[in-house]
């Protein structure tokens, strides 16, 4: 019996390694599960429309003309525009969506050119990008902790993260954003350690691609800047392996890499500044006051989504009771990082989480708004959280203690429980037609179901009042029966065109359209309290 126990103790590291490899394989597999299972939602529609070289105004000029069309007609704007070039893609983003950097859209255009467009092919690109993040997470964790077990744990947490799998299956730039946050952190640490121009060039290149992927990558760069400044509070010591360098030299090297990145991004930065009013009109997040209580709820849901994402109602107490243990786990992990790691490591973790978070959260708290309540805006923070949790489990699992709370068996069991919740979360998401991140299209599956039940129904659509009708009607067109008629109306709709007999519905009507309908002695009745669909009576 004693020999058996000793044998088990010897092979425990191999068992854990095998377990983590299995977890990583499961996470990879789930990225490909039900790729077309969720509705192709509003934001994804715009990704494809931009990549194809179209503009929203072109769509409006063609369709919002008091005419009857088929859902299939609208899907023309989800295929490459005949005769278009990548310049058309750039023009579409620059004139209508300048807050979105163009790199991912150009990659999506290449994918459309090579493979055509379908829901699966559009989502396949972010899946592939998310897979590249895994080895970079391993390298980053190794650079920080010099531990293969911690590096493998960090990779496993990223692989099975409900948030990362969700956005790996979304035809948007967020999996690329995650990759470049991780890759830039790794490049920065290598540049600090080796102090070679080649590594600084790699860091600068990662920042260039990061900025051209999403302007919020600037938050990651701010975190890196804070990291370098905090290192300066240390007495001047060697940051390289072979020579001693004064701090100002490191600071100059870092600033040089940042200046190069900003200069390379300046063409798009000029476009962004010149279209600032358009950016404010489209995003408009700061104009929606959000209470501190609701912000706190969003923060809890956002930071725990890397571990668990079981969807309840936003105001349900069960939601937060379920998330509370995971909040505690994250706090304990960050405390352990602060207590046990060297200064260089803990500063990197803390600045990578807190600087991006506070840059978004403080304006919300002080001035009002909801920037920090948008989970995908916090992507810069999440790798640091995953690295902290990986370190927490790694140190407890290899301490060989037998105590109840601090023992190896307890922490191995807790690790299995955390991964189980992650697995339940991604399984539930995989079997759902929509998920929380698909606002304003999360109710589209129910709208499709209701419309398709009414054979030959007519759906009236105008531009709406909140910039979402264009994306949502194309989203619906992927699933609507060809028999459904779409009446696309302008500011002076001709309701005499409505067919007699079949049911008539209206999608998210503008105030002007509601008033015209009322003046024509029709009534609008919501089909469901939470729905954007109305029935005309």
Image: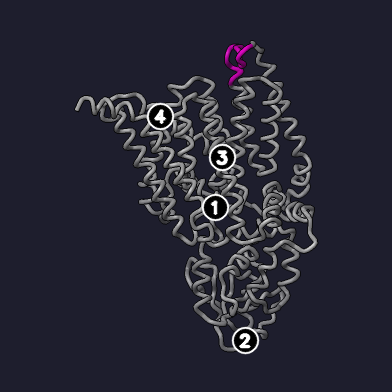
User: Relative to residue 184, is residue 172 depicted above or below?
Assistant: below
Gap between marks 1 and 2 measured at Cα: 40 Å
Gap between marks 3 and 4 measured at Cα: 21 Å
Q: Which residue is mark 1?
A: 169
Q: Residue at horizontal 60%, vertical 89%?
A: 500
Q: Element under label 4? A: helix
Q: Nearer the viewer, mark 3 or mark 2?
A: 3
- Residue 133 tag number: 3
**Where residue 169 sits: x, y (%)?**
54, 52
**Which of the marked residues, 1 or 2, is nearer the chain's N terminus?**
1
**Which of the marked residues, 3 or 4, is nearer the chain's N terminus?**
3
Left or right, 277 with reference to 471: right
Gap between marks 3 and 2 measured at Cα: 53 Å
**Where residue 70 sits: x, y (%)?**
64, 76
255 or 390, nearer to the observer? 390
Crowd class of label 3 (few under 14; some 14 to 19; many from 20; radius 10 Å): many
**Where residue 324 sits: x, y (%)?**
37, 42
Q: Element under label 3? A: helix
345 or 16, nearer to the observer? 16
Q: Nearer the viewer, mark 1 or mark 2?
A: 1
Crowd class of label 4 (few under 14; some 14 to 19; many from 20; radius 10 Å): many
Q: Which residue is mark 4?
A: 394
Left or right, 521 with reference to 1: right
Does residue 27 show up magenta in the picture?
Answer: no
Q: Which residue is mark 2?
A: 499
């Amino acid at each position: 019996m004693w020999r058996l126990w000793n044998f088990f103790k010897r092979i425990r590291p191999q068992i854990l390694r095998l377990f983590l490899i299995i977890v990583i394989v499961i996470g990879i597999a789930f990225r490909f599960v039900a790729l077309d299972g969720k509705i192709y939602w509003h934001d994804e529609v715009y990704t494809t429309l931009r990549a194809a070289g179209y503009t929203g105004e072109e769509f409006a000029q063609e369709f919002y003309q008091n005419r009857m069309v088929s859902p299939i007609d609208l899907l023309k704007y989800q295929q490459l525009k005949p005769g278009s070039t990548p310049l058309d893609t750039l023009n579409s983003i620059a004139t209508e969506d300048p807050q979105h950097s163009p790199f991912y859209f150009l990659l999506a255009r290449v994918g459309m050119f090579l493979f055509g467009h379908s829901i699966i092919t559009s989502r396949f690109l972010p899946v592939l990008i998310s897979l590249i993040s895994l080895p970079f997470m391993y390298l980053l964790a190794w650079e920080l902790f010099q531990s293969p077990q911690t590096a493998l744990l960090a990779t496993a947490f990223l692989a099975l993260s409900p948030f990362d799998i969700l956005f790996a299956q979304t035809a948007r730039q967020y999996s690329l954003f995650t990759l470049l946050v991780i890759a830039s952190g790794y490049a920065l640490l290598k540049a600090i350690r080796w102090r070679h121009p080649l590594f600084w060039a790699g860091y600068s290149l990662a920042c260039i691609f990061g900025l051209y992927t999403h302007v919020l990558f600037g938050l990651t760069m701010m975190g890196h800047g804070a990291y370098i400044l905090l290192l300066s509070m240390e007495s001047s010591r060697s940051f390289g392996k072979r020579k001693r360098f004064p701090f100002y030299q490191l600071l100059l090297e870092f600033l040089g890499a940042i200046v190069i990145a900003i200069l390379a991004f300046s063409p798009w930065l000029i476009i962004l500044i010149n279209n600032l009013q358009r950016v404010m009109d489209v995003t408009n997040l700061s104009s929606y006051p959000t209470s501190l209580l609701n912000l706190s709820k969003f923060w809890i849901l956002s930071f725990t989504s890397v571990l668990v994402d079981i969807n309840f109602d936003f105001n349900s107490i069960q939601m937060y009771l379920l998330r509370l243990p995971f909040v505690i786990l994250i706090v304990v992990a960050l405390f352990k990082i602060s207590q046990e790691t060297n200064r260089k490591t803990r500063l990197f973790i803390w600045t990578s989480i807190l600087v991006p978070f506070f840059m978004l959260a403080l304006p919300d708290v002080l001035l009002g708004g909801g920037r920090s309540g948008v989970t995908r805006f916090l992507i810069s923070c999440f790798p640091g959280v995953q690295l902290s949790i990986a370190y927490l489990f790694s140190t407890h699992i290899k301490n060989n203690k037998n105590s109840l709370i601090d023992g190896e068996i307890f922490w191995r069991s807790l690790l299995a429980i955390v991964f189980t919740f992650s697995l339940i979360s991604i399984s539930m998401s995989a079997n759902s037609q929509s998920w929380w991140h698909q606002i304003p299209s999360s109710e589209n599956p129910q709208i499709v179901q209701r419309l398709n039940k009414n054979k030959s129904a007519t759906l009236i659509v105008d531009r709406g009042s909140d910039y979402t009708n264009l994306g949502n009607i194309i989203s619906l067109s992927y699933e609507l029966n060809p028999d459904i008629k779409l009446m696309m109306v302008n500011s002076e709709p001709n309701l005499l065109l409505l067919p007699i007999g079949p049911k008539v519905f209206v999608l998210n009507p503008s105030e002007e359209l509601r008033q015209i309908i009322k003046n024509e002695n029709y009534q609008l009745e919501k089909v469901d309290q939470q729905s954007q669909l109305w029935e005309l009576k």
